Image (cartoon, rainbow, N blue to C red):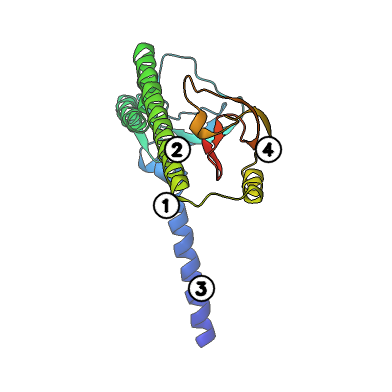
């Protein structure tokens, strides 16, 4: 008895599933919309499309679809009036364009406005870079000033200590033909240098020796 009930239950379930699939099939939807399900000679069939005045591309093959008859077209779910479909598609397209414009506004600018915007952004970028460069130079100046002030308060280094410090600062300890050498204290307009062999550190370009290390000029 239980076996019979089980078989009946399976049969009812299968029938219900088949009925649901049949009701939700494109053909059933077509017939509910007063259309006729038939075979067409091309891929376009009676499908709706947004008419932009151009020739529609259709492939030559047998296509089963819904024929919605005169004045209507098949949108994949139901038969709808051609005018209604055109209005809906144009409205949806306008919404999509508005969303695209909000996300990518530059795509909708004219050439002159786009050039002005590009120039404005370039000027802003240059200003930012100039400010950043000025800040770096200011920090270097303060650092150099602190270095010079600190060197004035330090105990003078011995010759061996100066040679070691010069080497650590990537300088070269050598003999100069005058007493100015590469000393920071002698770097000024009109500085008087005496002809005298002097051992000191050559700190290289844009740097000078302050007696303790190489500092920025």
Q: CA distance from mark 1 to mark 3?
A: 20 Å
Task: Tell me which label, 2 or 4, sits earlier in the chain.
Answer: 2
Q: Which tag, 3 or 4, sits closer to the chain's start? A: 3
Q: Which mark is residue 152?
A: none
Vertical arrangement, residue 62 with respect to residue 165, above or below: above
105 vs 129, nearest the viewer: 129
Q: Is residue 134 visible?
A: yes
Image quadrant in which you'd find residue 203: top right
- How many neighbours does mark 2 have within 10 angstroms: few (below 14), some (14-19), or many (20 or more)? some
User: Quick check: marks 1 and 3 in contact, CB under 8 Å?
Assistant: no
Q: Nearer the viewer, mark 2 or mark 3?
A: 2
**Which badge, 2 or 3, is on the more N-terminal residue?**
3
Alpha carbons under labels 1 and 2: distance apart: 81 Å
Closer to the chain start, of discs 1 and 2, is 1
Q: Which residue does the numbered mark 4 point to in the structure image?
A: 172
Q: Are marks 3 and 4 in contact (CB under 8 Å)?
A: no
Front one among 43 and 129: 129
* The residue positioned farthest toward the top in the image shown: 112
Tell me the residue that label 2 is attached to.
140
Cβ atoms at labels 2 and 3 below 8 Å apart? no
- Between the residue at mark 2 and the residue at mark 3, the CA separation in whole angstroms equals 87 Å
Residue 118, given in percent of the width and then of the height, sits at 39, 20
Q: Residue at x 60, y 30 (%)?
A: 181
Depth check, mark 1 against mark 2: the one in front is 2
Q: Position of residue 130 (x, y in %)?
A: 40, 27
Residue 148 at x, y = what percent?
45, 41
**In this figure, which residue is indicated by the disc labeled 3?**
10
Report the residue marked by disc 1: 23
């Amino acid at each position: 008895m239980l076996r019979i009930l089980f078989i009946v239950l399976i049969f009812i379930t299968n029938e219900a599933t088949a009925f649901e699939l049949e009701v939700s099939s494109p053909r059933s939807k077509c017939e509910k919309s007063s259309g006729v399900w038939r075979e067409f000679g091309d891929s376009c069939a009676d499908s709706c499309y947004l008419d932009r005045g151009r020739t529609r591309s259709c492939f030559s093959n047998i296509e089963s679809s819904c024929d919605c008859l005169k004045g209507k077209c098949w949108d994949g779910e139901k038969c709808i009036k051609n005018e209604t479909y055109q209005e809906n598609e144009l409205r949806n397209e306008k919404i999509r364009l508005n969303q695209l414009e909000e996300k990518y506004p530059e795509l909708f600018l004219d050439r002159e406005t786009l050039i002005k915007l590009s120039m404005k952004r370039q000027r802003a970028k240059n200003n930012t870079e100039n400010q950043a460069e000025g800040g770096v130079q200011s920090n270097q100046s303060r650092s150099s000033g602190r270095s010079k002030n600190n060197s004035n308060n330090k105990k003078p280094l011995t010759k061996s200590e100066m040679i070691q410090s010069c080497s650590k600062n990537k300088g070269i300890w050598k003999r100069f033909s005058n007493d100015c050498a590469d000393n920071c204290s002698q770097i000024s307009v009109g500085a008087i240098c005496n002809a005298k062999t002097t051992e000191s550190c050559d700190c290289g370009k844009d740097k000078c020796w302050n007696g303790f290390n190489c500092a920025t000029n």
